[in-house]
Image (cartoon, rainbow, N blue to C red):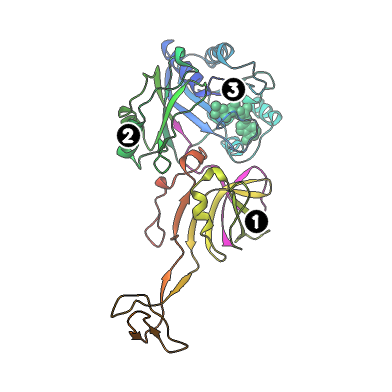
Amino acid sequence: MFLGIDDTDSPDGMCTTYLGAMLAENLRSAGYTIGELRLIRLNPNVIWKTRGNAAICLEVSGGTPEAVFDTACELIEMFAEFDCENTNPGVVVVNERPDPAFYYKALQRFCTIGETVRRLNKIGALYRGYKCGRGLIGALAAVSSVLPDATYELLAYRSVERFGTPREIVAESFFAAAAATFPHTWDTVDPAAGTVVCVPHGKDPVLYGIRGESPEWVEASAALMISEPPAFTQIWRTNQGTDAHLLDYNGEPQDGVSYQIDGVVDGEPTTLIGGHVDFLFHPDAGGPQIRVFAFEPTKEFRHTVRKLHSSDRLTLCGSWRKDALHLEKFRANSLRPAWLRKSPKCPVCGGRMTSAGYNKGYKCRSCSGRVRELEITEQIRGITEGWYEVPPDARRHLAKPIARIHEEKSGMSE
Ligand code: ATP
Protein backbone atom coordinates (compact mmCIF):
# COMPACT_ATOMS: atom_id res chain seq x y z
CA MET A 1 0.00 0.00 0.00
CA PHE A 2 1.05 3.63 -0.39
CA LEU A 3 0.79 6.27 2.33
CA GLY A 4 0.89 9.96 1.38
CA ILE A 5 1.30 12.90 3.78
CA ASP A 6 1.55 16.63 3.23
CA ASP A 7 1.32 20.03 4.89
CA THR A 8 2.37 19.26 8.46
CA ASP A 9 4.96 21.99 8.95
CA SER A 10 5.20 25.75 9.44
CA PRO A 11 8.03 28.28 9.17
CA ASP A 12 8.43 27.81 12.95
CA GLY A 13 9.18 24.14 12.89
CA MET A 14 8.56 20.56 11.83
CA CYS A 15 9.15 19.18 8.34
CA THR A 16 6.93 16.71 6.53
CA THR A 17 9.94 14.52 5.65
CA TYR A 18 10.90 14.33 9.36
CA LEU A 19 7.40 13.23 10.29
CA GLY A 20 7.49 10.71 7.42
CA ALA A 21 10.83 9.30 8.52
CA MET A 22 9.56 8.97 12.12
CA LEU A 23 6.43 7.28 10.84
CA ALA A 24 8.49 4.84 8.77
CA GLU A 25 10.49 3.99 11.90
CA ASN A 26 7.31 3.49 13.99
CA LEU A 27 5.82 1.21 11.34
CA ARG A 28 9.06 -0.79 11.05
CA SER A 29 9.10 -1.27 14.84
CA ALA A 30 5.49 -2.47 14.65
CA GLY A 31 6.53 -5.17 12.15
CA TYR A 32 5.65 -3.51 8.83
CA THR A 33 8.04 -3.58 5.88
CA ILE A 34 8.86 -0.17 4.44
CA GLY A 35 9.80 -0.16 0.75
CA GLU A 36 10.60 3.06 -1.05
CA LEU A 37 10.38 6.45 0.68
CA ARG A 38 9.56 9.22 -1.82
CA LEU A 39 10.04 12.93 -1.45
CA ILE A 40 7.92 14.56 -4.14
CA ARG A 41 8.20 18.24 -5.05
CA LEU A 42 5.06 19.79 -6.52
CA ASN A 43 4.35 23.02 -8.43
CA PRO A 44 6.94 25.50 -7.09
CA ASN A 45 4.57 28.38 -7.85
CA VAL A 46 1.83 27.56 -5.30
CA ILE A 47 1.62 30.51 -2.95
CA TRP A 48 0.65 28.64 0.22
CA LYS A 49 3.77 26.45 0.35
CA THR A 50 5.90 26.69 3.51
CA ARG A 51 9.23 26.19 1.76
CA GLY A 52 9.76 23.90 -1.20
CA ASN A 53 6.27 22.42 -1.74
CA ALA A 54 7.21 18.90 -0.75
CA ALA A 55 4.97 15.92 -0.04
CA ILE A 56 5.97 12.38 0.88
CA CYS A 57 4.93 8.83 0.07
CA LEU A 58 5.87 5.64 1.93
CA GLU A 59 5.49 2.20 0.39
CA VAL A 60 4.27 -0.08 3.19
CA SER A 61 3.56 -3.80 3.33
CA GLY A 62 2.10 -5.90 6.12
CA GLY A 63 -0.93 -5.18 8.29
CA THR A 64 -4.06 -3.47 7.05
CA PRO A 65 -4.50 -0.08 5.32
CA GLU A 66 -6.76 0.94 8.21
CA ALA A 67 -4.03 0.26 10.80
CA VAL A 68 -1.40 2.16 8.76
CA PHE A 69 -3.83 5.04 8.30
CA ASP A 70 -4.55 5.19 12.08
CA THR A 71 -0.82 5.19 12.94
CA ALA A 72 -0.19 8.02 10.45
CA CYS A 73 -3.10 10.10 11.81
CA GLU A 74 -1.92 9.61 15.41
CA LEU A 75 1.58 10.84 14.57
CA ILE A 76 0.25 13.84 12.62
CA GLU A 77 -2.07 14.77 15.48
CA MET A 78 0.91 14.62 17.85
CA PHE A 79 3.49 16.51 15.78
CA ALA A 80 1.93 18.66 13.02
CA GLU A 81 2.07 22.43 13.51
CA PHE A 82 -1.69 22.87 13.85
CA ASP A 83 -1.37 26.37 15.34
CA CYS A 84 -0.09 27.78 12.06
CA GLU A 85 -2.97 29.09 9.98
CA ASN A 86 -1.26 27.84 6.83
CA THR A 87 -0.80 24.24 8.07
CA ASN A 88 -3.61 21.99 6.81
CA PRO A 89 -2.39 18.38 6.97
CA GLY A 90 -3.60 15.61 4.70
CA VAL A 91 -3.17 11.81 4.92
CA VAL A 92 -4.03 9.34 2.15
CA VAL A 93 -3.68 5.54 2.02
CA VAL A 94 -4.29 3.57 -1.19
CA ASN A 95 -3.75 -0.08 -2.05
CA GLU A 96 -2.37 0.63 -5.53
CA ARG A 97 -0.80 3.65 -7.18
CA PRO A 98 -3.62 5.76 -8.68
CA ASP A 99 -3.49 7.22 -12.22
CA PRO A 100 -0.45 9.58 -12.40
CA ALA A 101 -2.57 12.28 -14.10
CA PHE A 102 -3.30 13.85 -10.71
CA TYR A 103 0.42 13.90 -9.84
CA TYR A 104 1.24 15.65 -13.11
CA LYS A 105 -1.49 18.22 -12.53
CA ALA A 106 -0.22 19.02 -9.01
CA LEU A 107 3.37 19.12 -10.30
CA GLN A 108 2.77 21.32 -13.34
CA ARG A 109 -0.48 23.18 -12.67
CA PHE A 110 -2.97 23.81 -9.86
CA CYS A 111 -5.50 21.56 -8.11
CA THR A 112 -8.47 22.36 -5.89
CA ILE A 113 -9.39 20.65 -2.63
CA GLY A 114 -12.81 19.82 -4.12
CA GLU A 115 -11.44 17.92 -7.13
CA THR A 116 -8.99 16.11 -4.83
CA VAL A 117 -11.74 14.88 -2.51
CA ARG A 118 -13.86 13.75 -5.48
CA ARG A 119 -10.88 11.83 -6.84
CA LEU A 120 -10.14 10.25 -3.42
CA ASN A 121 -13.76 9.09 -3.14
CA LYS A 122 -13.71 7.73 -6.68
CA ILE A 123 -10.61 5.59 -6.09
CA GLY A 124 -11.83 4.43 -2.66
CA ALA A 125 -8.85 5.84 -0.75
CA LEU A 126 -8.66 6.14 3.02
CA TYR A 127 -8.07 9.81 3.69
CA ARG A 128 -8.28 12.54 6.30
CA GLY A 129 -7.88 16.26 5.76
CA TYR A 130 -7.27 18.41 8.81
CA LYS A 131 -8.51 22.00 9.02
CA CYS A 132 -9.19 23.11 5.42
CA GLY A 133 -7.71 19.82 4.15
CA ARG A 134 -5.39 21.37 1.58
CA GLY A 135 -2.68 18.83 2.43
CA LEU A 136 -4.82 16.18 0.71
CA ILE A 137 -3.68 17.65 -2.63
CA GLY A 138 -0.01 16.92 -1.95
CA ALA A 139 -0.78 13.60 -0.22
CA LEU A 140 -2.77 12.29 -3.22
CA ALA A 141 -0.17 13.65 -5.66
CA ALA A 142 2.63 11.88 -3.75
CA VAL A 143 0.93 8.45 -3.81
CA SER A 144 0.07 8.97 -7.52
CA SER A 145 3.62 9.97 -8.47
CA VAL A 146 5.72 8.31 -11.15
CA LEU A 147 9.45 8.85 -11.52
CA PRO A 148 10.65 8.35 -15.09
CA ASP A 149 13.77 10.17 -13.90
CA ALA A 150 14.75 10.19 -10.23
CA THR A 151 17.46 11.46 -7.91
CA TYR A 152 18.15 10.87 -4.22
CA GLU A 153 18.44 13.06 -1.16
CA LEU A 154 20.02 12.01 2.11
CA LEU A 155 18.42 14.06 4.86
CA ALA A 156 20.19 14.19 8.22
CA TYR A 157 17.88 15.22 11.07
CA ARG A 158 18.83 16.94 14.32
CA SER A 159 18.38 15.73 17.89
CA VAL A 160 15.25 17.26 19.43
CA GLU A 161 17.23 19.14 22.09
CA ARG A 162 19.12 21.02 19.35
CA PHE A 163 16.01 22.26 17.49
CA GLY A 164 16.15 26.05 17.15
CA THR A 165 19.88 26.29 17.98
CA PRO A 166 22.59 27.17 15.40
CA ARG A 167 23.68 24.11 13.40
CA GLU A 168 27.24 22.99 14.12
CA ILE A 169 29.08 21.97 10.98
CA VAL A 170 32.67 22.07 9.73
CA ALA A 171 32.20 23.96 6.46
CA GLU A 172 35.57 22.83 5.00
CA SER A 173 34.46 19.19 5.25
CA PHE A 174 31.30 20.02 3.25
CA PHE A 175 33.40 21.64 0.49
CA ALA A 176 35.71 18.61 0.46
CA ALA A 177 32.76 16.18 0.32
CA ALA A 178 31.18 18.15 -2.53
CA ALA A 179 34.44 18.22 -4.52
CA ALA A 180 35.06 14.50 -3.96
CA THR A 181 31.62 13.45 -5.21
CA PHE A 182 30.77 16.05 -7.93
CA PRO A 183 29.06 15.66 -10.44
CA HIS A 184 27.36 12.67 -8.76
CA THR A 185 26.17 14.97 -5.96
CA TRP A 186 25.27 18.64 -6.34
CA ASP A 187 24.08 21.71 -4.44
CA THR A 188 25.99 20.87 -1.25
CA VAL A 189 27.99 24.09 -1.58
CA ASP A 190 28.19 27.07 -3.92
CA PRO A 191 31.90 27.17 -4.81
CA ALA A 192 31.60 30.57 -6.55
CA ALA A 193 30.02 32.26 -3.50
CA GLY A 194 32.06 30.19 -1.02
CA THR A 195 28.92 29.17 0.90
CA VAL A 196 27.42 25.92 2.18
CA VAL A 197 23.92 25.63 0.71
CA CYS A 198 22.72 22.23 1.94
CA VAL A 199 22.24 23.36 5.56
CA PRO A 200 18.99 25.20 6.36
CA HIS A 201 18.90 28.07 8.83
CA GLY A 202 15.41 27.77 10.32
CA LYS A 203 13.98 25.98 13.35
CA ASP A 204 13.10 22.85 11.36
CA PRO A 205 14.65 19.46 12.25
CA VAL A 206 16.84 19.16 9.12
CA LEU A 207 20.60 19.31 9.74
CA TYR A 208 21.58 18.98 6.07
CA GLY A 209 20.44 17.42 2.80
CA ILE A 210 22.76 15.82 0.25
CA ARG A 211 21.41 15.52 -3.28
CA GLY A 212 22.81 13.05 -5.75
CA GLU A 213 22.43 10.42 -8.45
CA SER A 214 22.24 7.35 -6.22
CA PRO A 215 21.97 6.27 -2.58
CA GLU A 216 25.64 5.25 -2.75
CA TRP A 217 26.82 8.70 -3.86
CA VAL A 218 24.86 10.65 -1.26
CA GLU A 219 26.09 8.27 1.45
CA ALA A 220 29.68 8.63 0.23
CA SER A 221 29.36 12.40 0.45
CA ALA A 222 27.74 12.36 3.90
CA ALA A 223 30.52 10.08 5.18
CA LEU A 224 33.02 12.91 4.51
CA MET A 225 31.05 15.60 6.37
CA ILE A 226 31.85 16.68 9.87
CA SER A 227 28.97 18.09 11.93
CA GLU A 228 27.02 17.80 15.16
CA PRO A 229 25.86 14.18 15.39
CA PRO A 230 22.62 13.69 13.41
CA ALA A 231 19.84 11.99 15.38
CA PHE A 232 19.19 9.84 12.29
CA THR A 233 19.39 9.98 8.51
CA GLN A 234 17.00 8.92 5.78
CA ILE A 235 17.56 8.57 2.04
CA TRP A 236 14.60 9.65 -0.09
CA ARG A 237 13.95 8.89 -3.75
CA THR A 238 12.79 12.12 -5.36
CA ASN A 239 11.75 14.01 -8.48
CA GLN A 240 14.17 16.81 -7.50
CA GLY A 241 16.69 17.89 -10.13
CA THR A 242 14.72 16.31 -12.99
CA ASP A 243 12.94 19.29 -14.64
CA ALA A 244 9.68 17.33 -14.20
CA HIS A 245 7.84 20.63 -13.67
CA LEU A 246 8.59 21.99 -17.16
CA LEU A 247 6.03 21.90 -19.97
CA ASP A 248 6.84 22.46 -23.63
CA TYR A 249 5.70 25.99 -24.43
CA ASN A 250 2.69 26.29 -26.75
CA GLY A 251 2.56 30.06 -27.26
CA GLU A 252 -0.05 30.65 -24.54
CA PRO A 253 1.65 31.33 -21.20
CA GLN A 254 -0.37 30.57 -18.06
CA ASP A 255 0.35 32.02 -14.66
CA GLY A 256 2.08 29.61 -12.26
CA VAL A 257 3.15 27.17 -14.99
CA SER A 258 6.82 26.41 -15.77
CA TYR A 259 8.03 26.07 -19.35
CA GLN A 260 10.88 25.16 -21.63
CA ILE A 261 10.81 27.65 -24.52
CA ASP A 262 12.88 27.79 -27.72
CA GLY A 263 13.19 31.09 -29.51
CA VAL A 264 15.19 34.22 -30.26
CA VAL A 265 16.31 37.17 -28.15
CA ASP A 266 14.44 40.23 -29.32
CA GLY A 267 16.29 43.28 -27.99
CA GLU A 268 19.21 43.93 -25.66
CA PRO A 269 19.07 42.98 -21.94
CA THR A 270 18.58 45.84 -19.51
CA THR A 271 19.44 46.16 -15.82
CA LEU A 272 16.60 47.50 -13.70
CA ILE A 273 16.42 49.16 -10.29
CA GLY A 274 17.25 46.50 -7.70
CA GLY A 275 19.73 44.77 -10.01
CA HIS A 276 17.18 42.61 -11.85
CA VAL A 277 17.99 41.96 -15.51
CA ASP A 278 15.35 41.54 -18.20
CA PHE A 279 15.15 41.03 -21.96
CA LEU A 280 12.50 40.40 -24.60
CA PHE A 281 12.20 37.05 -26.35
CA HIS A 282 10.32 35.78 -29.36
CA PRO A 283 9.22 32.13 -28.85
CA ASP A 284 9.35 29.77 -31.86
CA ALA A 285 5.96 28.40 -30.77
CA GLY A 286 4.39 31.76 -31.70
CA GLY A 287 2.17 33.85 -29.49
CA PRO A 288 3.23 37.13 -27.98
CA GLN A 289 6.78 38.34 -27.49
CA ILE A 290 7.61 37.58 -23.83
CA ARG A 291 9.56 39.35 -21.11
CA VAL A 292 12.24 37.30 -19.32
CA PHE A 293 13.68 38.12 -15.89
CA ALA A 294 16.88 37.09 -14.12
CA PHE A 295 16.29 38.45 -10.64
CA GLU A 296 18.88 39.94 -8.29
CA PRO A 297 19.16 36.79 -6.09
CA THR A 298 20.45 34.90 -9.13
CA LYS A 299 23.67 36.91 -8.64
CA GLU A 300 26.43 36.14 -11.20
CA PHE A 301 23.93 34.40 -13.52
CA ARG A 302 22.77 37.93 -14.39
CA HIS A 303 26.25 38.77 -15.73
CA THR A 304 25.84 36.00 -18.30
CA VAL A 305 22.32 37.14 -19.18
CA ARG A 306 23.65 40.67 -19.81
CA LYS A 307 25.96 39.23 -22.50
CA LEU A 308 23.01 38.17 -24.65
CA HIS A 309 22.20 40.10 -27.82
CA SER A 310 19.29 40.41 -30.19
CA SER A 311 19.06 37.42 -32.60
CA ASP A 312 20.72 34.95 -30.21
CA ARG A 313 18.87 31.63 -30.30
CA LEU A 314 18.15 30.18 -26.85
CA THR A 315 16.24 27.50 -24.98
CA LEU A 316 14.81 29.03 -21.80
CA CYS A 317 13.59 27.19 -18.69
CA GLY A 318 11.57 29.01 -16.05
CA SER A 319 8.21 29.80 -14.47
CA TRP A 320 5.59 32.12 -15.91
CA ARG A 321 4.49 34.53 -13.19
CA LYS A 322 2.97 37.98 -13.34
CA ASP A 323 3.26 38.23 -17.14
CA ALA A 324 6.95 37.32 -17.33
CA LEU A 325 9.23 34.29 -17.43
CA HIS A 326 11.34 33.91 -14.28
CA LEU A 327 14.50 32.33 -15.64
CA GLU A 328 15.97 29.18 -14.01
CA LYS A 329 18.47 28.30 -16.73
CA PHE A 330 19.01 28.70 -20.45
CA ARG A 331 20.93 27.14 -23.28
CA ALA A 332 22.66 29.38 -25.81
CA ASN A 333 21.98 27.42 -29.01
CA SER A 334 23.51 29.86 -31.49
CA LEU A 335 25.01 33.22 -30.76
CA ARG A 336 25.15 36.10 -33.20
CA PRO A 337 28.82 36.78 -34.02
CA ALA A 338 30.10 40.08 -32.65
CA TRP A 339 33.56 41.26 -33.60
CA LEU A 340 35.81 43.95 -32.28
CA ARG A 341 38.01 45.77 -34.81
CA LYS A 342 41.59 45.97 -33.65
CA SER A 343 44.64 47.46 -35.32
CA PRO A 344 47.61 45.09 -35.75
CA LYS A 345 50.74 45.04 -33.61
CA CYS A 346 53.87 46.62 -35.17
CA PRO A 347 56.11 43.84 -36.61
CA VAL A 348 59.20 45.94 -35.75
CA CYS A 349 58.68 47.21 -32.18
CA GLY A 350 55.54 45.33 -31.09
CA GLY A 351 53.58 48.53 -30.40
CA ARG A 352 49.90 48.95 -31.32
CA MET A 353 49.57 50.48 -34.81
CA THR A 354 47.06 53.08 -35.95
CA SER A 355 45.35 53.56 -39.31
CA ALA A 356 47.48 55.33 -41.90
CA GLY A 357 44.37 56.56 -43.70
CA TYR A 358 41.68 55.08 -45.91
CA ASN A 359 43.07 52.00 -47.73
CA LYS A 360 46.63 52.84 -46.66
CA GLY A 361 47.09 50.16 -44.02
CA TYR A 362 48.60 50.91 -40.62
CA LYS A 363 51.59 52.80 -39.31
CA CYS A 364 53.40 52.60 -36.02
CA ARG A 365 53.48 55.86 -34.06
CA SER A 366 56.67 54.89 -32.18
CA CYS A 367 58.96 53.48 -34.89
CA SER A 368 57.21 54.52 -38.12
CA GLY A 369 56.89 50.86 -39.21
CA ARG A 370 54.12 50.29 -41.77
CA VAL A 371 51.93 47.32 -42.71
CA ARG A 372 49.18 47.00 -45.31
CA GLU A 373 47.48 43.96 -43.80
CA LEU A 374 43.78 43.96 -43.08
CA GLU A 375 42.37 44.84 -39.68
CA ILE A 376 42.48 41.95 -37.28
CA THR A 377 39.42 41.14 -35.28
CA GLU A 378 38.58 39.58 -31.97
CA GLN A 379 35.35 37.98 -30.80
CA ILE A 380 33.90 39.94 -27.87
CA ARG A 381 30.82 37.94 -26.84
CA GLY A 382 32.30 36.53 -23.61
CA ILE A 383 29.72 33.74 -23.79
CA THR A 384 29.79 30.49 -25.74
CA GLU A 385 27.13 27.99 -26.73
CA GLY A 386 25.95 25.79 -23.89
CA TRP A 387 23.86 25.75 -20.70
CA TYR A 388 23.90 28.44 -18.00
CA GLU A 389 22.06 28.14 -14.67
CA VAL A 390 21.29 30.15 -11.55
CA PRO A 391 23.59 29.48 -8.55
CA PRO A 392 22.64 26.64 -6.15
CA ASP A 393 21.23 29.06 -3.59
CA ALA A 394 18.67 30.38 -6.08
CA ARG A 395 17.85 27.02 -7.66
CA ARG A 396 14.39 25.47 -7.63
CA HIS A 397 14.33 21.97 -6.10
CA LEU A 398 12.87 20.55 -9.32
CA ALA A 399 15.32 22.28 -11.69
CA LYS A 400 17.74 19.85 -13.31
CA PRO A 401 21.27 21.05 -12.58
CA ILE A 402 23.59 21.30 -15.57
CA ALA A 403 25.74 18.64 -13.91
CA ARG A 404 22.91 16.20 -14.77
CA ILE A 405 22.48 17.28 -18.39
CA HIS A 406 24.26 14.78 -20.62
CA GLU A 407 23.84 15.87 -24.23
CA GLU A 408 24.79 14.08 -27.41
CA LYS A 409 28.19 15.23 -28.65
CA SER A 410 26.69 16.35 -32.01
CA GLY A 411 26.91 20.08 -31.57
CA MET A 412 25.34 20.20 -28.10
CA SER A 413 27.78 21.13 -25.38
CA GLU A 414 27.35 21.62 -21.64
P1 ATP B 1 8.04 21.74 3.25
O1 ATP B 1 8.79 21.81 1.97
O2 ATP B 1 8.78 22.31 4.37
O3 ATP B 1 7.49 20.36 3.49
P2 ATP B 1 6.04 22.87 1.80
O4 ATP B 1 6.73 23.97 1.09
O5 ATP B 1 5.90 21.51 1.23
O6 ATP B 1 6.74 22.68 3.13
P3 ATP B 1 3.31 22.77 2.50
O7 ATP B 1 3.20 23.12 3.93
O8 ATP B 1 3.27 21.33 2.15
O9 ATP B 1 4.60 23.48 1.99
O10 ATP B 1 2.19 23.57 1.70
C1 ATP B 1 1.91 23.37 0.35
C2 ATP B 1 0.41 23.17 0.19
O11 ATP B 1 0.05 23.33 -1.17
C3 ATP B 1 -0.05 21.78 0.59
O12 ATP B 1 -1.26 21.90 1.28
C4 ATP B 1 -0.27 21.07 -0.73
O13 ATP B 1 -1.26 20.07 -0.66
C5 ATP B 1 -0.69 22.22 -1.61
N1 ATP B 1 -0.36 22.02 -3.02
C6 ATP B 1 0.73 21.43 -3.54
N2 ATP B 1 0.71 21.47 -4.88
C7 ATP B 1 -0.42 22.10 -5.24
C8 ATP B 1 -1.00 22.44 -6.50
N3 ATP B 1 -0.41 22.16 -7.63
N4 ATP B 1 -2.19 23.08 -6.48
C9 ATP B 1 -2.79 23.41 -5.32
N5 ATP B 1 -2.29 23.12 -4.10
C10 ATP B 1 -1.11 22.47 -4.05
68 relative to 282, above or below? above
Q: Position of residue 122 (x, y in %)?
A: 65, 27
Image: magenta residue range: 237-266
34 relative to 42, above or below? above
Q: Position of residue 335 (x, y in %)?
A: 49, 65
Residue 177's disc number: 2
Is ligand 1 closer than 8 angstroms to the Cβ of mark 3? yes
Ligand 1 visible in quadrant? top right
Query: Which label lies toward us, 2 or 1?
Result: 2
Q: Secondary structure at mark 3?
A: loop
Horizontal relation, residue 214 to residue 3: left or right: left
Q: Secondary structure at mark 1?
A: strand
Q: Position of residue 45 (x, y in %)?
A: 62, 38
Report the residue marked by disc 3.
10
| Residue type at tag 2 | Ala
Horizontal relation, residue 190 to residue 14: left or right: left
**Residue name at image x 68 percent, y 18 percent:** 131
User: Counting residues from the N terminus, which is met first, the one under dot 3 or under dot 1?
Assistant: 3
Q: Secondary structure at mark 2?
A: helix
| Residue type at tag 3 | Ser
**Residue name at image x 65 percent, y 61 percent:** 286
Packing grade of label 1 (10 A; few <14, some 14-19, many >=20) is some
Task: Report how far apart the C-alphas of labels 3 and 2 lie in the structure.
Answer: 31 Å
Can I make out residue 324 in this image? yes
